[in-house]
Amino acid sequence: MPSRGRTEITLIVSVAAVVTWTAIVIVVFARQPVLGGDFMQFYTLGTLARTGDWAAQYDWPAFHALQASLVPGSNPYYYAPAYPPLTSILYLPLALLPFQAAFATWALASAALYAWLMRLAARACAVTASRNVVVGALLFPPFIALITSGQSTLWPLVGFVAGWWALERGQPLLAGVLFALVSLKPHFGLALALVPLLAGTWRVVLGALLGLAVIALSTYWVCGADAIAAYWSTTLGILADPAALDPLDARHTHGLRAALAAHVSPRAALAAWALVSAVVAWMASRVWRSRESWSTRVAALLVATLLISPHLLVYDGVLLAPAAAWLADTAVRERKWDVLAALALLAICFAVPTARVLDVPLTLPLMGWVLWRCPARRI
């Protein structure tokens, strides 16, 4: 594309980003009952890490009492933390600040980290300028939802992009170690556990196991056995009742399991989800076994991750940001306009709660179509 055309695109997208975020700061943040939304949960986790009470996050009534004491006005909001114990240490520095300052720091740091990750991912784009990828990513609806709700799905995004970076440099063992960071939100690791295994990328699998071992040992050393036992008990409870993590407003849920559970019995929903997840993992492994670029292969993994995840909200769609950039760039080069249209609709549907048919989010078939259309030229 001529440089003049790229400059015009950059200008248009930049103006759109400034206008959008100005409106968000003025309208959304100003009208929030509690500034930062869900960030109050992570602020409370950081406080527990600061006091060294690692197991208290799994005592949900006690957790809520501490949250209400730390954040005035948060008493009506209840959370059920189910993160690995060591995750709390990531928020410890923020707990040293007053709540409002902590949220402002979190929002700015999250935006900066996201922009840096997208700039890194943009290096794999052949026809799209890096600056356009970054500025456009700031308008990606799931990212906007992530910042306004004070959420934390950037942590697994770091793991996915870092793993891709290592694969691009021919270091699959290191890639596996870096992919282990996704375990900070374990439900996003299901596809990651299946796809490299089905594809036979054994050094990635070995690296992931090494990374998980380091995290497990660090958790035992820092948090202790009691916190691990409490986490394990909480995890078993969540597995028995996955709906415990779903929001009260089901329109913000984009998970396949939740969509199935709205129409059939829990047992049938679980069986159907497992079957579809196996098919999705096979589809993604088909791309991993190909000779496509690692950006295409990791894009397929990211799409499969969201399709398989049993718990998926609007802001979790931020994991699609690098995949959307890579696949859109490929679609433009190969003139796959249906893929480009599907990616555009996918971004819109994440932001529109009514984009559903029979209570099934349109994001699900759109992601399935994008995964099906991922190129997979054989080796």
Image: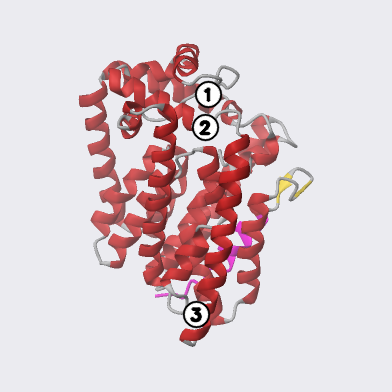
The answer to whether residue 309 is visible is no
Give the mark toward the camera: 2 or 3. 3
Residue 187 image position (x, y, % from top left): 47, 39
Q: Which residue is mark 1?
A: 79
Per the image, the residue denoted by label 3 is 6
Say whether residue 115 is left or right of residue 215. right
The amino acid type of the residue labelled 2 equals Asp
**Badge 2 or badge 3: first in the primary sequence:** 3
Q: Amino acid at mark 3?
A: Arg
Could you tell me which secondary element the residue under label 1 belongs to?
loop
Image marks 1 and 3: residues in contact by CB distance under 8 Å: no
Q: Which residues are magenta?
A: 365-379
Is residue 19 or residue 82 the one in the foreground?
Answer: 19
**Residue at the extreme right of the image, as rendered:** 358
Q: CA distance from mark 1 to mark 2?
A: 9 Å
Q: Are marks 2 and 3 in contact (CB under 8 Å)?
A: no
From the viewer's perspective, is residue 231 above or below residue 276?
Answer: above
**Amino acid at circle 1:** Tyr
Residue at x 51% of width, y 68% of height? 327
The span from disc 1 to disc 3 (Cα, nearest Å) is 45 Å
Answer whether residue 173 is magenta in the image: no
Q: How many marks?
A: 3
Asked if the residue under mark 2 is in contact with the one under mark 1, i.e. CB atoms within 8 Å, the reply is yes
Q: At 52% from the left edge and 54% from the top edge, which residue is drawn?
A: 304
Q: Nearer the viewer, residue 158 or 360?
A: 158
Circle 1 or circle 2, nearest the eye:
2
Q: Which mark is residue 38?
A: 2
> Percent position (x, y) of residue 132?
48, 70
- Dot 1 or dot 2, earlier in sequence: 2
Q: Is residue 58 visible?
A: yes
- Is disc 2 surrounded by few (<14), some (14 to 19) or many (20+) residues within 10 Å? many
The quarter in which the C terminus is drawn is bottom left
